[in-house]
Image (cartoon, rainbow, N blue to C red):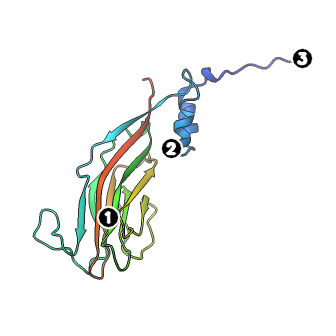
């Protein structure tokens, strides 16, 4: 009878587990990271320092840093802020949470999204570019919690959060209590 070499779970390289987890959703990757204390690299969470956690755009608000009011005919999104992600190589996922709502009546046009490599988010009624990594639309009339989750692309150089109010007059968008967390593989160097 031929003998076969044995391969034990704890002798596999940590990079293999990182590759396996790259195919998993964030909840599944977190569960996978605790399957073996000796073999599978654990995952940790790190807050992402956002420039702003609350903002309102709309027909009644002045644009930040200017005396200009929101243009009712503006159908394009606003670049809200950059997501400062450090070492993309070890990040499995980024989760952004917060609360949002629109003006509370009429048409729903608000949107929040994350894009990569300087690509702007879509205008009203436009197809989403492949560089939009996650997003939600339309914003609800009543305050609602939201969650956006994405896995950073190692070839991406930047990630930005965009918000779109919607054109046509009378629209507003409020986002607040926004936070971002990066879930990283804890690899020994």
The alpha-carbon separation of the residues under discs 2 and 3 comes to 44 Å
Q: Nearer the viewer, residue 32 or 3?
A: 32
Q: Is residue 153 found left or right of 64 in the rendered image?
A: right
Q: Residue at x 16, y 74 (%)?
A: 69
Q: Is residue 129 found left or right of 68 in the rendered image?
A: right
Q: Position of residue 157 (x, y in %)?
A: 35, 49
Between marks 2 and 3 in the image, the one whose residue lies nearer the viewer: 2
Q: Nearer the viewer, residue 141 or 47?
A: 141
Q: Secondary structure at mark 3?
A: loop
- Which residue is labeled 2 in the image? 26
Q: Secondary structure at mark 1?
A: strand
Q: Is residue 55 found left or right of 17 in the rendered image?
A: left
16 shown above or below 47 = above
156 shown above or below 186 = below
Question: Do the residues bearing badges 1 and 3 touch, measured as CB atoms within 8 Å?
Answer: no
Q: Residue at x 67, y 21 (%)?
A: 8
- Which residue is labeled 1 in the image? 163
Q: Residue at x 42, y 74 (%)?
A: 126
The residue carrying pointer 1 sits among few (fewer than 14), some (14 to 19) or many (20 or more) residues within 10 Å by Cα, namely many
- Which residue is labeled 3 in the image? 1
Q: Earlier in the sequence, mark 1 or mark 2?
A: 2
Residue 65 image-quadrant placement: bottom left
């Amino acid at each position: 009878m031929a003998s076969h070499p044995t391969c034990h779970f704890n002798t596999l390289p940590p990079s293999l587990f990182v590759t396996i987890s790259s195919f998993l959703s964030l909840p599944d990757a977190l569960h996978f990271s605790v399957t073996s204390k000796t073999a599978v690299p654990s995952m940790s969470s790190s807050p992402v320092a956002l420039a702003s956690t609350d903002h309102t755009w709309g027909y009644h608000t002045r644009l930040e840093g200017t005396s200009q009011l929101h243009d009712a005919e503006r159908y394009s999104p606003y670049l809200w802020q950059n997501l400062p992600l450090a070492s993309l190589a070890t990040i499995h996922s980024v989760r952004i949470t917060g609360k949002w709502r629109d003006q509370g009546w009429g048409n729903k046009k608000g949107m929040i999204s994350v894009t990569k490599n300087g690509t702007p988010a879509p205008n009203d009624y436009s197809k989403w570019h492949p560089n939009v990594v996650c997003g939600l639309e339309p914003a609800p009339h009543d305050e609602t919690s939201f969650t956006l989750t994405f896995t950073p692309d190692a070839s991406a150089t930047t990630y930005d959060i965009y918000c779109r109010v919607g054109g046509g007059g009378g629209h507003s968008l409020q986002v607040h209590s926004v936070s971002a967390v990066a879930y990283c593989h804890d690899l020994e160097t």
